[in-house]
Image: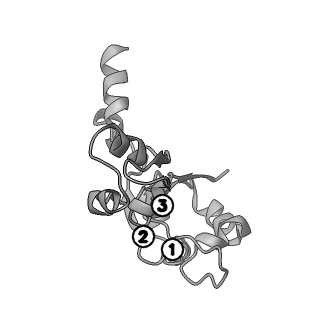
């Protein structure tokens, strides 16, 4: 069985603009912190509410990371037919199209080098591919720091 984990991280808030906050009557200090924490505050100089959207730059969509384990070449055809990933493909024309930033492949090199797997990888456009594989060479040198800590303590 092939396994694909989709990790959609939360959007990154826009940058706080202190000049806009001052122009709307907010003084530097605790109110600036509240605005940056997505809380509305009352203006210090007029009877209006200052909302985070008034003083923050545009948000940026959070990164999307796929973790893929396709153990054998026989499983590649499954990957090619998975419809639930269509909104992540670069050629998606849907309004809900999403850009994948990274794909971590836990797939053996013998599979990732096949024409069908390469075709599947290309469907994600400009995503960066991290080839982590699960060949025996990766057992001694763990790829993730947390797995390194776990192997030392066990």
Q: Nearer the viewer, residue 139 or 46?
A: 46
Give the image quarter of residue 13. bottom left
- The mark found on residue 124 in the picture is 1
Give the image quarter of residue 140. top left
- The mark found on residue 127 in the picture is 2
Q: Which of 53 and 103 is in front in this view?
A: 53
79 on left or right of 33: right
90 on left or right of 82: left
| Image point (31%, 29%), residue name | 148
For the C terminus, the quadrant is: top left
Give the image quarter of residue 19. bottom left
**Residue 121 screen position, x and y as percent:** 49, 72
| Image point (56%, 70%), residue name | 98
**Residue 42 screen position, x and y as percent:** 47, 47
Q: Which of 133 and 40 is in front in this view?
A: 40
| Image point (38%, 47%), residue name | 44
Distance from disc 1 to disc 3, alpha carbons, whole Å, reads 32 Å
Nearer-N-terminus badge (3/2) = 3
- The mark found on residue 53 in the picture is 3
The answer to whether 27 is drawn above or below residue 59 in the figure is above
Whether residues under marks 2 and 1 lie with C-beta atoms below 8 angstroms apart, the answer is yes
Q: Which of marks 3 and 2 is in front?
A: 3
Q: Nearer the viewer, mark 1 or mark 3?
A: 3
**Residue 129 screen position, x and y as percent:** 39, 64
Nearer-N-terminus badge (1/3) = 3
């Amino acid at each position: 069985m092939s396994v694909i984990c989709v990790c959609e991280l939360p959007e990154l808030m826009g940058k706080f603009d202190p000049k806009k906050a001052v122009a709307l009557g907010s003084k530097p200090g605790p109110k600036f912190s509240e605005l940056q924490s997505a809380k509305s505050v009352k203006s210090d100089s007029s009877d209006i509410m200052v909302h985070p959207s008034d003083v923050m730059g545009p948000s940026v969509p959070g990164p999307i990371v796929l973790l893929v384990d396709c153990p054998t070449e026989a499983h590649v055809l499954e990957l090619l037919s998975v419809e639930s990933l269509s909104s992540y493909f670069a050629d998606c024309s849907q309004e809900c199209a999403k850009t994948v930033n990274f794909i971590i492949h836990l797939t053996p090199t013998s599979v990732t080098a096949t024409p069908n797997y390469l075709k599947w990888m290309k469907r994600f456009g400009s995503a960066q591919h991290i080839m982590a594989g699960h060949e025996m060479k990766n057992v001694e040198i763990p790829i993730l720091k947390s797995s390194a800590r776990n192997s030392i303590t066990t």
